[in-house]
Amino acid sequence: MLKDLAVLAPFSLLADAAIVLGILVVLGDDVAAFSHHESVVLSKGLPAVPFLFGISIYCFEGIGLILPLEDAMENKKQARCCLRAAASATSV
């Protein structure tokens, strides 16, 4: 077993870098797709399936993080307001 979680810090940093890289790839793909309005295709077929699973897993990871945070809050009624504010700030 691990005696100190600080040993895992480099792996956490690597995971954060992979997440940022993934976000940049998704945004780059979106910008490239929307820069040519005539050639935008609603379905890219079978090669887009791994991309779909990646986005889905990323979304579920966020949901799995929010529920424990809500449970840990002292004032649980404030959690919904806090979530809305965070989602609005992220969307802008």
Image (spheres, rainbow, N blue to C red):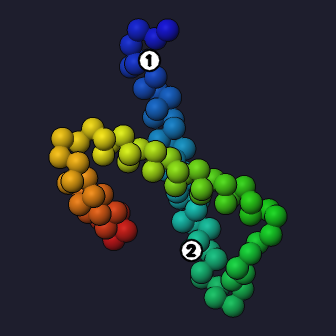
Instruction: Pick the residue in front: 38 or 41.
Output: 41
Please indicate, yes or no, whether residue 48 appears anywhere in the rendered image: yes
- Which amino acid is tagged 1? Val
Where does residue 70 sit, x and y in percent of width and height?
A: 30, 46
Q: Is residue 22 above or below residue 17?
A: below
Query: Quadrant location of residue 72?
Result: top left
Viewer-side residue, 23 vs 67: 67
| Residue at 72% in and 55% down | 50
**Vertical arrangement, residue 52 with respect to residue 67, above or below:** below
Helix, strand or loop status at disc 2: helix
Q: Quickly name the residue at label 1.
A: 7
The secondary element bearing badge 1 is classed as helix
Q: Quadrant of residue 28?
A: bottom right
Q: Is residue 86 visible?
A: no
Q: How many marks?
A: 2
Q: Who's the residue at 37% across and 68% down the image?
A: 91
From the viewer's perspective, tell me whether residue 3 is left or right of residue 82: right
